[in-house]
Image: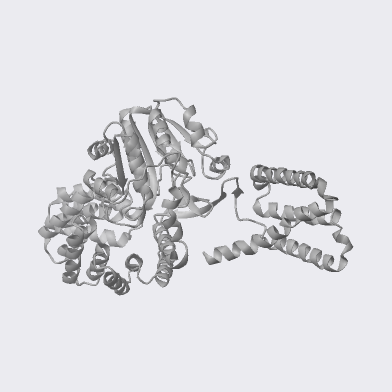
Amino acid sequence: MPRIVFLTAALFFVPSAVLGMVTPLVVKLNLRDLDHAGDVVGKIYAISTAGAIFGVFITGFVLVQWLGTRQTILLVALILVGMSLAFGGLWRVRMPTMPMIVLFVGIGGFSSISGDLNSGCLKESNYFCIQVTDDIVDGRHKVKALHLDKLLHSYVSLEDPTLLAYNYEKVFSELITLVAQRDPGFRTLIIGGGGYTVPRYLETLYPKSTVVVIEIDPAVTRVAFDHLGLPCDTRIVTYNEDARMTVPKLNSGQYALVIGDAFNDLSVPYHLTTREFNEQIAGLLTPDGIYAVNVVDKFQSGRFARAFVHTLKETFPNVYVIREDDNWPDDGQKTHVVAASVRPLSYESLRNANIQAGRGALISHFMPDESMERWLNARKRVLLTDDRAPVDNMLAALHLEGTGPSRASTHYNYGVELEAQGRTEDAIAAYSEAIRLDPGLSQAYNNRGLSYIKLGEYLRANQESDQAIRIDPRLAQAYNNRGFSYSNLGQYQKAILDYDEAIRLNPRFALAYSNRGSAHDEMSKPQKAIDDFDRAILFDPRLDGAYVNRGYVYLNTGDLEKAIDDFDNAIGLDPRLVLAYVNRALAYTLQGNDAKSRDDAAIAIELGFDVVEIDGAIERARSRR
């Protein structure tokens, strides 16, 4: 905070003070007698006020988009210097004037040559500094990343419009599948276009549907066309204006799905959170329609998510909080999807629709009703209305985490983002900075340990998990990570003790069950291993590793049909899961189905598996037949 105040004062106080001297000096120069004081002062202040109004509009609507903020400031400076020379008689005072002009020209020239006048924006609009960069997600998918000011807003794959990088987008996709099952020609309204990731996804997979987007910034839409793969002949209809202006113009009762994607952790348009706006959205929905919004907040200590859910419940009889896991006590900053509807929405209906569409297990986890009531009652319930919506105050804690000692959270979140991109060593550096700023941040130690696991440095990973557990003995993830390190070091009994503790702390911890199953398998306890894999799959049906590992146990115990079923399920969840193809090839070999074995081996080799290693494994399997 002090740094921000100092920099702001240094940049703006001196010019503001100097410009503030102009009006009283002009009054003094024009005032001949006190009888005309009111007339002189009134005219000067009228001209000053008109100039201020003109300056606001010409800057906001013309100059920033035309020139950019830095060039606009330089232009104003040039005009002021020119006016001082032309009208102020500054040229008469040669000694101080010449050095000032030389200094001004020197600084201006240096800034121009050095590139300091370049804002770094691909496009600077009335709303954002827009940037597009190249990036990689999941360690393998090349994407374009859309940055709006300091916020990484969207990942967009030019080659694959169906690629969704964020978990909340995947939750949206599962809701879309349910809506599409009811009506293939459904209409969707999306508030907040951004990189047009979800609109392109809809247009590609559901050609019979109609997609309408409200994106307040026309420059963002232009960038989507020019740089983010939005085709010129798209069927997507876009309104470039504020949603509160557009929504009342749309036909009521026409939309099976309304998606709100205009919120982030830095900026939430308060007027899109209120009861009045929710009522307008409810008027757009069909009887089975769903309104789904992404909300960023700390789930337990935060205030905004609670207020938003409570406000939605004033309009919709059914409101649900959905996320990619069921660790509801977690207080980390996360993006949740809040879904509202007139008719009930169930996990079973969502799962059945996605299974029928061939999508496999859900990523979505619904917050239980009783948990939601306890969560809402944990703080005073706040109703957001057009008259009172203190959204900025509610989200102040997230902003303050970027200042002072709690900057650690910013570095921690950056580390999570880097890890998701496959940049493990960069993630370790970000976690290390978070720890330097806040040595008590247990989750940073835990995540740094997980990064070391990915690099195969199990002893260092163990040390990180030890520190995380010392700080927070209830951190189930740290016990799981330490157990995984012990397993890779061959210390299976210690590993199982850690997995036991992780499961005690979180009885639905699917990954801990899966890892304990692998440890039991290494200790030649196949039935205990299968029992653990069963529980892992029960709690997380999308855990592809559990299917692979259970299939491997079945393979070793001779239950080839069950093994092949598990490898099939794993490949259905991740078609690039090379170990599933390798093990299924071995199972087919043991069955005597050499043709299918060769097919799977070829796919495994194409995905990067060693040719000699898989050929040797298949030969050994043939000798066992």
Q: Is 510 on the left-hand or right-hand side of 418?
A: left
Asked if residue 205 shows in the view, the reply is no
Residue at 56% over, 48% down: 128
Where in the figure is residue 159, as x and y percent of width and height?
46, 45
Q: Position of residue 49 (x, y in %)?
A: 70, 45
Q: Residue 220 sits in which quadrant? A: top right
- Identify the residue at the far front of this view: 35
Q: Residue at x 27, y 72 (%)?
A: 470
Corner quadrant of residue 556? bottom left
Q: Is residue 111 visible?
A: yes
Q: Position of residue 507 (x, y in %)?
A: 18, 57
Q: Nearer the viewer, residue 55 or 477?
A: 55
Left-right relation of 553 to 356: left
On screen, 412 above or below 146?
below
Between 232 and 26, the residue placed more toward the observer is 26
Task: Give the camera-side residue of 143 and 384.
Answer: 384
- In this orientation, which residue lies closer to the viewer: 170 or 213? 213
Residue 82 higher or lower than 241, as above or below: below
Residue occupying image coordinates x 21% and y 61%: 515
The quadrant where residue 483 appears: bottom left
Relative to 531, residue 565 above or below = above
Pinpoint residue 315: horizontal percent, then vertical percent.
34, 34
